[in-house]
Amino acid sequence: MELLKKYNKRGSWYTDYPPLGLWEQKVSDEEYKTALTEFSVSSGDKPVFLYIHYPFCPKQCYYCMCFSEVSRSHKKSQEFLNHNGREVDMLNKLFEKNSFKPNIRKIHYGGGSPSWLNQEEFDILDEQVSRLADKSNLEEIAIEVDPRTVTPEMMRHYHEKGINRISFGVQDFDPEVQKAINRIQPYEMVERLMSPEMRKLFNRGFNFDIIYGMPKQTVESFRKTIQQCIELSPDRLGVCILGWRPDIFKHQQKINESDLPNFEESTEMQLESMEMLLAAGYERIGIDHYAKPDEDLAVTKRQDKLHRSAMGYNPGDCVDMIGLGPSAMNRMQNYYFQKEYNIRRYNELVDAGKFPVFRGYKLNKDEQIRRDIMEKIICYDRIDFDEIEKRYGINFKEHFEYELNSFGELIQDGIIELSDRELTVTPTGTLFHRHVCTVFDELLRKGKGYKHARDSA
Ligand code: SF4
């Protein structure tokens, strides 16, 4: 607890490096096309992840940290689909010009609330996606589901369309907490969607998102929520802290700050939930993720085939990602891009035949090495100097002399251990991944301070 208090400072989680807040704004559609062209020419048959962001939600959850807009209008869904279809066509045209067909292996429908799309709308989205991805080639199609917006019939329809993983936004089962966050979804509502029939339909599994540090949560109430999660037995769980930024997310101002648990209580929730999930047989994947031992995340972690991005932990070989929809992230080799947040502007750009990019970044070789190192820390708690030297043709100790001399305090506090040829994050240190990554953040050292992704969006 004392160490957590000592290191309790705002900072990047290094799910991407450089962090999103530092990517260049005013990136043009031409730069995005150049990156796509380079990607078409050099990525070959490498597996690609396709992410689609549907930005609307029927109701505002007060804690929300995602990019979403409240709307119950299906006219807006139609508008979204029209623009998504055009973006798919623009991508296909560019790829065809380069005689390239991306080897899309995984699709994720996120948001917002993609489960707000009705059956007819979802079928249009599915058809658009089929124009870009060969559905017979897919390992996984996942969708984020708000349990309040679906019926078992709609779940069956998802299955018919090839969806094989469901991610439920659960957050907390306590009725008082649900009232305080404006999201009423009783335990039974989720339980009904996880019946034996549903389990059979979605054979890649069920994910739960849980948040601690929420209004009206107590250590006891959160313990009960975790116990209820264990009873429902999802295959993966993300247990994250509330990102409290009412200055950025204005709807958070509807939360009474005095209802939030204090640092000690939130920390107890974090540590106790970890103990409970481990005792229930889950494996801790990293910062905030847990999975059953036979689940992809746990298996690929053992096989050294795990990655981490803004989308969370990602098992397997899909590192590059094409993102569609407002605010969607793209990662193509040494390029990052993010699509426009502003939906009106997004639509205008697509109408003008342009890719609606908001910001981007081209990594130099040194930044690529640092990104790789941070991923090793976050996924494997270890940096093997020989492996990095072999991959990038550098002398690790010379290249990172400054960093290796800066670990004094983290060693003293038992967070890492340094030997001649490797850096190891200790079991205690796994709670401090981002502090270890910070040492490798040269941009931060050179004065590019921490900036929240939405500070300027
Ligand atoms: S459903 Fe998700 S994206 Fe929509 S408001 Fe709630 S938390 Fe935000």
Image (cartoon, grey):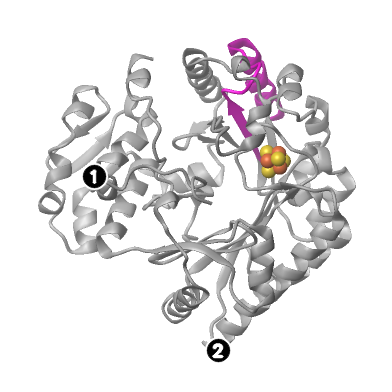
> Residue, x 55% and y 41% (percent of image)?
294
Count of numbered marks: 2
> Residue, x 24% and y 22% (percent of image)?
413
Is 62 on the left or on the right of 312, as rendered?
right
Q: Quadrant of residue 104?
A: bottom right
Is 308 on the left or on the right of 199, as rendered?
left
> Residue, x 68% and y 27% (percent of image)?
254
Q: Circle 1 sits in a helix, a strand or a loop, which is it?
A: helix
Q: Which residue is mark 1?
A: 445
> Residue, x 87% and y 44% (percent of image)?
152
Three-letter code, disc 1: Arg
- Magenta residues, start to end: 207-232
- Sequence-earlier tag: 2 or 1: 2
In the figure, 131 relative to 144: above or below?
below
Q: Which mark is residue 96?
A: none
Counting from the top left corner in percent of width and height, residue 82 is at: 77, 70
Mark 1 closeness class: few <14, some 14–19, many ≥20 residues within 10 Å: few
Q: Which residue is mark 2?
A: 97
Mark 2–mark 1 CB contact (< 8 Å):
no
Quadrant of the image containing the N terminus: top left
Q: Is mark 1 within 8 Å of ligand 1?
A: no
Residue 434 appears in the rendering: yes
Residue 234 appears in the rendering: no
Mark 2 closeness class: few <14, some 14–19, many ≥20 residues within 10 Å: few
Counting from the top left corner in percent of width and height, residue 138 is at: 63, 65
In the figure, 273 relative to 205: above or below?
above
218 in magenta: yes
Q: Circle 2 sits in a helix, a strand or a loop, which is it?
A: helix
Residue at the far top: name it: 220
